[in-house]
Image (cartoon, rainbow, N blue to C red):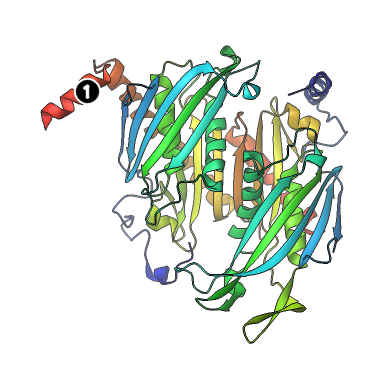
Amino acid sequence: MGKKKEEQIIYVDSKGKRLDGRKVDELRPIKITAGVIPRADGSAYLEWGQNKVFAAVYGPRECLPKHTASPYKAVIKFVYRMAAFSVPDRKNPKPGRREVEISKVCGEALERAIFVEKFPNTSIDVTVEIVDSNAGSRIAALTAASVALADAGIPMRDMVCGTSVGKAGGKIIVDLDKDEEDASDAVDIPIAMLPNSKEVVLLQLDGVLTRKEWDEAYKMAEVSAMKVYEVQKQALKAKYINGEADANKAEKKGVEEK
Amino acid sequence: MISALWDLRVDKVVADLKEGKRIDGRKVDEIRKITITHGVSENADGSARVKLGLTDVIAGVKMVPGTPYPDMPDEGSISVGAELLPMADPEFEVGPPRDEAIELSRVVDRGIRESKAIDFKDLCITEGEKVWVGFVDIYIINNDGNLFDACGIAAMSSLLETKMPKIEDGKIVKGEYAGKLKVRAKPVLSTFAKIGNVVVADPILSEEKAMSARFSVTITEDDNITAFQKGLPGSFKIDELNGAIDVAMKNSKQIRKLL
């Protein structure tokens, strides 16, 4: 934030193209593979632009330490972590305040989607590791985690899908990348929702935004989140309907192709 | 753990809200009485105690010289911390800040930082060498709900009265001050609780025990939004969010007058 020379940068040109050639409402390419970690109960690997994310789910299983359990519901333990090499300068591997906060809001967002009341006294452990990052990693984490939960066969009312929306150079745009996040007037709004009921389960904002701009941003977010939902569904269908249910088989196929 | 007594209060909160009443008689968009006391700590460079109903918090600022980040050699910074003191609530425990406290301080920090209330360039002492870091530390004395807003008000109140330590020949003169910290905006944080299908402003503790989701908005004097934070496992429909933003714009004006 707050670098000096970017005054001249045009974030959206006269043809409506952004720095990387995307349109204002265009997401970066998203690729999701379900079931990439054989030991886990459920897992997913996601690439969202440069972001690369592994998500694994264990549970429902005995909730330890015991005092963290609830007699009413499963406890969602979401851990978002960034690999030390995943950012331009090496990140201290010790979890920082940012990671703690993201873990908290992401876990809470997922809880709405899961029938937690069916599994009292248990925990559902969701861990996400960011191995490469370029803005928007918390939504990437949540998107991958949602697929991993479905892959684990955990009963859910809906998926959780989302995107970030925001502003750079005075224009409302979807799915900001790092260059756009560094704009002097940048606004970053990560949003996640349940696609079928349009309930907002995660919402944060950094930056300065008018009420009108928010209305515009939200509309774009809703449309984009649905696109993410489609990719999530495709990933699950690829594994469970198109016959790639065995992670090892998929792996072997990849090797043969090479 | 929720005690049986709290269960009863939660039932009452929910039942009352179904009839459009809040447990303490407020309207759904009405905030509690706010009292701000300045200068609670003489050793702090700025401090304030804020009572929001029975919620009671104390914030203090210390301006500390530090080294700037290499990519921003002429900019200082602020850092907000919140401590949920065990004296404030039977559920608060001794030890390092847990995720609740971290979220709380980061949301307060975000609203102030993004509103540019403090221009970090104002905090430069010697470019590339020395800058001021404003540490805002907030201690919860009594928790009766909505720590977010109480801490937001306390942080702004203490920053608004912060004096800048005096510098002579690049050295800090202990105990002497050179004017006040420049505060360029007055962002106000407003927090809402969703209970059943009702969204209420400034929840008290019993309402917080009943809420399924929480939503906070920071608004500046020119009606810009500078922070959002949705928390807890429940969800909001877009109309509920927009309704809360509108109430926040109205309530923040009332709170800002007290700053």
Q: Nearer the viewer, residue A114 or A226?
A: A114
Residue B115 visible within the image:
no
**SS for tag 1?**
helix
Few, some or many residues within 10 Å of mark 1 (<14, 14–19, 20+): some
Q: Is residue B238 above or below residue A38?
A: below
Q: Residue at x 32, y 21 (%)?
A: A38
Q: Residue at x 49, y 61 (%)?
A: A185
Q: Is residue B77 above or below residue A48?
A: below
Look at label 1 and name its amino acid: Ala
The one nearer the camera, B204 or B221, is B204
Task: Report x, y in % for residue B12.
Answer: 83, 22
What residue sits right under mark 1 in the picture?
Answer: A250
Q: Measured from the top left, where is residue B236 in percent x and y?
A: 61, 32
Q: Which quadrant would residue B32 be assigned to in this image?
A: top right
User: What residue lies at 45% left-to-right and 69% top-to-bottom?
Assistant: B70
The picture places residue B216, in percent across and down from the top left corner, at: 66, 43
Residue A248 in the image: x percent, y percent? Answer: 24, 21
The subunit carrying tag 1 is A
Relative depth, front residue between A73 and B130:
B130
What quarter of the picture does the N terminus of chain B occupy?
top right
In the picture, measured across the screen, residue A254 lies left or right of residue B104, that is left
Relative placement, left or right, of A204 versus A253 is right
Asked whether the viewer can see residue B36, the reply is yes
